[in-house]
Amino acid sequence: MSPASPIARRRVVVTGALGGIGSAVTARLLAEGARVLAVDHPDVVRSDPGPAAPDRHVLGVDLRDPAASGEVARQAAERLGGLDGLVNNAGVELRAPISEHVDERWDAVLDVNLGAPFRLARDLADLLASGRSAAVVNVCSIAVTGFAGQIAYDASKGGLLTLTRSLAVELGPRGVRANAVCPGFIDTPMLDEGALRPIAERVARTLPLRRLGRPADVAGAVSWLLGEDAGYVTGQSLFIDGGMNRS
Ligand SMILES: NC(=O)c1ccc[n+]([C@@H]2O[C@H](COP(=O)([O-])OP(=O)(O)OC[C@H]3O[C@@H](n4cnc5c(N)ncnc54)[C@H](O)[C@@H]3O)[C@@H](O)[C@H]2O)c1
């Protein structure tokens, strides 16, 4: 740990913290001396709660449960003693043509990817506003640009991007910044859901940077946006995509 890290001793909630990107974000924040409430689905937490560390607190909640955001707020206050950062990273993917987007599947994607970040921002806003230079980072996606075969996912991430901008203007006067990261294809288990991996690997070979992204690529950007070095940055979206939206 570097004592000079801009996020040392920051208290941060990370959702989807046991997944590919979430694990890397959590590891990076802990390495920089932050204290983390690592939130993930109870089934995931039960089967593998992840590495033990004194500053890593784990909470299993289903973010689709309307009571989950209140529980996260209670646990952040109790176990971290307050809150300086929220990383809305939990997300689900749905690869299917529009005809197969029945209401139930649409609702599920929108609820996890957009409803839950909204409820968390709403229920954690007071804690964040009384924190130290607090910041929200929402994990959106290159999908905000719109792709075929994933209409609910794209719409959810587009909504999350706009939610980020609204949070920036509404919570800015209370001392809370809000920014988005938009990863391109990142090498995590999500690429294996819905058989995205072959497409991702083919596209990666054509990108300016000629490779898939790594979870650590996203973690570095999230850490920077949470810290004081980004203290005058709010309402922005940072694409972490190997140049995909320019190629
Ligand atoms: N991997 C990529 O290429 C990529 C690209 C762009 C954006 N993203 C976004 O990055 C974020 C992390 O994705 P990842 O690739 O690490 O995927 P992942 O599947 O490895 O991780 C997602 C995490 O979210 C958790 N989660 C899902 N539903 C939940 C619920 N109802 N309650 C609590 N937790 C829940 C899962 O348990 C999992 O740990 C997602 O928001 C995803 O949309 C990923």
Image: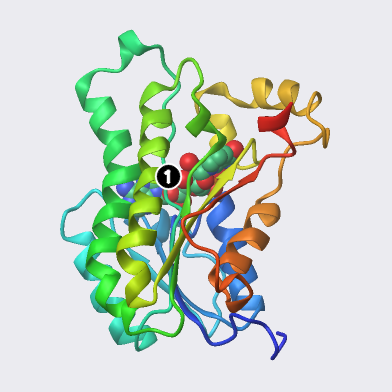
- Give the image location of residue 213, x and y in percent: 71, 43
Give whichever of 51, 71 is nearer the camera: 71
Q: Residue furthest top?
A: 99
- Give the image location of residue 190, x and y in percent: 54, 37
Q: Please state, as top left, top right, bottom left or bottom right, where the C terminus lies in the image.
A: top right
Identified at 28% across, 26% down, the residue is 105
Identified at 64% across, 75% down, the residue is 229
Relative side of 82 to 33, left or right: left
Q: Is residue 152 above or below residue 86?
A: above
In the structure shown, which secondary structural element does the residue marked by tag 1 occupy? Answer: helix
Neighbours of disc 1 within 10 Å: few (<14), some (14-19), many (20+): many
Q: Residue furthest left?
A: 67
Q: Is residue 144 above or below residue 89?
A: above
Residue type (three-letter) at the residue carrying disc 1 = Leu
Q: Is residue 189 visible?
A: no
Q: Is residue 23 above or below residue 150?
A: below
Relative side of 131 to 121, left or right: right
Identified at 64% across, 53% down, the residue is 218
Q: Is residue 33 visible?
A: yes
Looking at the rendering, which quadrant does residue 169 occupy? Answer: bottom left
- Give the image location of residue 98, x and y in percent: 35, 12
Q: Please state, as top left, top right, bottom left or bottom right, where the N terminus lies in the image.
A: bottom right
- Give the image location of residue 212, x and y in percent: 74, 37
Give whichever of 121, 175 is nearer the camera: 175
Looking at the rendering, which quadrant does residue 23 occupy? Answer: bottom right
Looking at the rendering, which quadrant does residue 88 occupy? Answer: bottom left
Number of marks present in the image shown? 1
Identified at 44% across, 85% down, the residue is 132
Relative side of 170 to 139, left or right: left
Name the residue tied to disc 1: 161
Give whichever of 127, 201 is nearer the camera: 127
